[in-house]
Image (cartoon, helix red, strand yellow):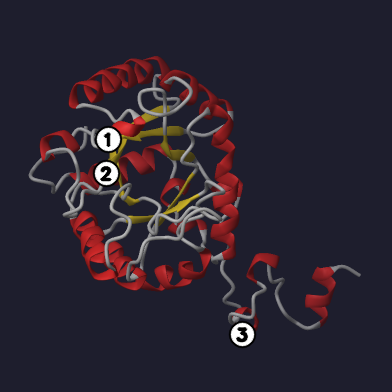
Amino acid sequence: MDEEDVYAALDLPFIEPELREGRGEIALAVARRLPQLVADQDIRGLLHCHTDFSDGSNTLEAMAEATRAKGYEYFGVADHSKTASYAGGLSVERVAIQHKLADELNARYQGRFRILKGIESDILEDGSLDYPDEVLARFDFVVASVHSRFKLDAKTQTERIIRAVSNPFTTILGHMTGRLLRRREGYQIDIETVLEACARHGVAVEINAHPQRLDLDWRWHQRALDLGCMFSINPDAHSVDELDLTSWGVLMARKGGIPPDRVLNCLGRDELVGYLTRRAMPLNGVSAP
């Protein structure tokens, strides 16, 4: 007898091991309302990855080719923005150089694979992003992240992040609490209020798959789902070897009960490009690049 037999004998659908936390999963099973959990094979492409343009180890071409070799449909480069000088953040001039290279590589791929031109834009202390709108409009997507001023009080930090989320160019809120497991507690924020803002503005909540982050914590995933949030499972890879960190994010998403239809990068290449283009069109009349 195996586990499936036990559940069948109880007239219950199989409850995935990740959901067995005494958080209402039995009632969901009785009601036949268990979620279909996201799986590795549902992830169609990678977002929030770094190259040697900022603090990554490998070139844009090497990262894209490694992503393509793994069977993904797109690679979303999101190097650090100009304020992150400690991480080789990109000046506006360097952004233009990277975009030219991405265009050249995309022309070579002839629609079979796509490099999406993103940026991990620092959230400044006042909640603004660190490029002007005309530069932000050049990106396919923007990951907005806090990398400084971690010790602001909860109210100020929450207001700071909400302002960033309300920026119409923000696509994904990166590693929401900033925690580094076994090294640093997350900064103080009202997570519920931030999630409400993400849902209201259509900003995806990152599940940062790096084992030191795993942020947003899985215990908040159901609340984010209830509020209507989308997620993005991102490796935050700084090398070819780190692309496979994505699987840790998938595990955390499964623990949180997230289905594939609520994960941004479970969309296929053309679907995602269409989504990003539609989302960008109302922004000051500027279409996505």
For the residues bearing labels 2 and 1, Cβ distance under 8 angstroms: yes
Which residue occupies 84% across, 72% down? 5
Q: Amino acid at mark 1?
A: Ser
Q: Residue furthest right?
A: 1
Quarter location, residue 269? top left
Which residue is identified by label 1?
81
Which residue is identified by label 3?
27
Q: Nearer the viewer, residue 196 or 124?
A: 124
Regarding mark 1 in the picture, which secondary structure is present there? loop
Which residue is identified by label 2?
122
Q: Residue 138 placed where, x, y %?
A: 20, 32
Whether residue 220 is situated above or below residue 143 in the rendered picture: below
Quarter location, residue 55? top left
Q: Amino acid at mark 2?
A: Asp
Q: Amino acid at mark 3?
A: Ala
**Residue 6 visible:** yes
Q: Residue 156 placed where, x, y %?
A: 22, 65
Q: Residue 114 placed where, x, y %?
A: 40, 28
Regarding mark 2 in the picture, which secondary structure is present there? strand
Tell me which label, 3 or 1, sits earlier in the chain. Answer: 3
Q: CA distance from mark 2 to mark 1?
A: 6 Å
The mark closer to the camera, 3 or 1, is 1
Which residue occupies 51% across, 70% down? 219
Whether residue 61 is situated above or below residue 190 in the rendered picture: above
Near mark 3 (Cα within 10 A), the count class, few <14, some 14-19 or many ≥20, is: few
